[in-house]
């Protein structure tokens, strides 16, 4: 009799929980949302994450808390989100290096971008600036290459971590220019930029958003931009391609993802909010102001196609560089 009562209780409880799920989704968000940034504070991913979090907070009328989980080229933060409750209350600021490069460079990862995440929006695709400390006696890429060849191995370039876009941008330049430079990885672009500003390293390929302030203030010197065309923020700055390396082109996209098993209606509500952000002229202007060219909203199918094309492009680059990190 007792066993029968327990079974009835379990069935009833399961039915109540099942009935409650649509209500929970319909009421989303009923409590604060956590937005995980997989790099240290102060870098481009962190800056973008805080801007997106602020918009989501206003639009969804709920507090959005940004949490930095740096390390392992974004893998620590990615793993934490992948293992979180897929209820829409833990979101992820991701980048090309986490979704595209890590799987190409590492045989074993604690997360699987295809299985563990649902990419809801691609916010921006930003070019990179080749910038040097003022102590480097070069004002052009040609002068830098000449100096580097006279001082092989004496120049250090920083990155947000081994295997990331910033790192590979430097490796591509090393190979194309035929120069010897030492890579110094950090737990995010913020710490790398700090060491560049202090002169502890001499060079960095930095995303436009965080490169612009120190370049415009004269604290760092820009030598070239990684895009195929010059940029409006620095119209006199030549592209690396036009400076003698026509095949050089690098950019990095950033997006917002959720755990793959998040309920469809919750995912759709988050995506709708992100789409409104990308159509909001004030939000777009704020992105442009700090060097993040905003994209327009994309459907989930368009996002998959976009990431697939980027993966194919980087697969060719990684093969040409002959880099393996396992």
Image (cartoon, helix red, strand yellow):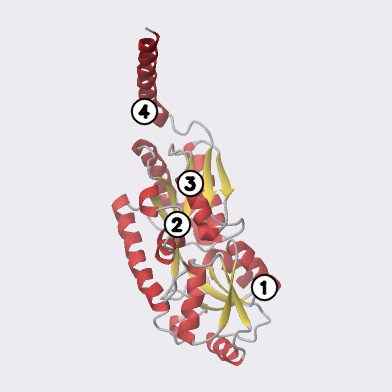
Q: Secondary structure at mark 4?
A: helix
Image quadrant assignment for residue 40? bottom right
- Looking at the image, is 36 positioned above or below residue 8? below
Residue at 65% of width from left, 72% of height from top? 196
Do callouts 1 and 3 mark residues in contact (Cβ within 8 Å)?
A: no
Category of crowding for the residue at label 3, using alpha-carbon neighbours closer than 10 angstroms: few (below 14), some (14–19), many (at least 20):
many
C-alpha distance separating marks 1 and 4 = 54 Å
Category of crowding for the residue at label 2, using alpha-carbon neighbours closer than 10 angstroms: few (below 14), some (14–19), many (at least 20):
some
Q: Earlier in the sequence, mark 3 or mark 4?
A: 4
Quarter holding the N terminus is: top left
Q: Earlier in the sequence, mark 2 or mark 1?
A: 2
Q: Earlier in the sequence, mark 2 or mark 4?
A: 4
Residue 8: numbered disc: none
Q: Secondary structure at mark 3?
A: helix
Give x and y (percent) for residue 30. 49, 30
* Camera-side mark, 1 or 3: 3
Q: Earlier in the sequence, mark 2 or mark 3?
A: 3
Q: Earlier in the sequence, mark 1 or mark 4?
A: 4
Which residue is disc 4 drawn over? 22
Residue at 58% of width from left, 61% of height from top? 188
Q: Secondary structure at mark 2?
A: loop
Residue at 42% of width from left, 77% of height from top? 321
Which residue is disc 2 drawn over? 109
């Amino acid at each position: 009799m007792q066993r029968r009562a327990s079974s009835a209780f379990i069935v009833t409880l399961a039915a109540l929980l099942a009935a409650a799920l649509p209500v929970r989704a319909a009421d989303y968000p009923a409590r604060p949302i956590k937005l995980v940034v997989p790099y240290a504070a102060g870098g481009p991913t962190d800056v973008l994450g805080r801007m997106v979090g602020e918009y989501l907070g206003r639009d969804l009328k709920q507090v959005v808390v940004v949490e930095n989980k740096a390390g392992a080229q974004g893998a620590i933060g990615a793993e934490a989100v992948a293992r979180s409750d897929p209820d829409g209350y833990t979101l992820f600021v991701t980048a090309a290096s986490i979704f595209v490069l890590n799987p190409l460079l590492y045989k074993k990862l604690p997360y699987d971008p295809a299985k563990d995440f649902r990419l809801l929006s691609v916010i921006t695709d930003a070019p990179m600036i080749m910038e040097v400390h003022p102590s480097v006696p070069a004002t052009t890429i040609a002068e830098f290459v000449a100096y580097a060849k006279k001082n092989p191995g004496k120049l250090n370039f920083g990155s947000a971590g081994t295997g990331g876009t910033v790192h590979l941008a430097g490796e591509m330049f090393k190979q194309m220019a035929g120069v010897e430079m030492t890579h110094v990885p950090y737990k995010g672009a913020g710490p790398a930029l700090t060491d560049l500003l202090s002169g502890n390293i001499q060079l960095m390929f930095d995303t436009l958003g965080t490169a612009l302030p120190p370049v415009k203030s004269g604290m760092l010197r820009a030598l070239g931009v990684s895009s195929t065309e010059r940029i409006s923020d620095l119209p006199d700055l030549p592209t690396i391609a036009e400076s003698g390396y026509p095949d050089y082109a690098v950019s990095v996209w950033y997006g917002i993802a959720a755990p793959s098993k998040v309920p469809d209606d919750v995912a759709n509500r988050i995506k709708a909010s992100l789409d409104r952000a990308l159509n909001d002229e004030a939000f777009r202007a704020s992105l442009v102001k700090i060097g993040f060219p905003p994209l327009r909203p994309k459907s989930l199918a368009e996002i998959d196609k976009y990431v697939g094309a980027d993966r194919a492009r980087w697969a060719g680059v990684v093969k040409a560089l002959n880099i393996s990190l396992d």
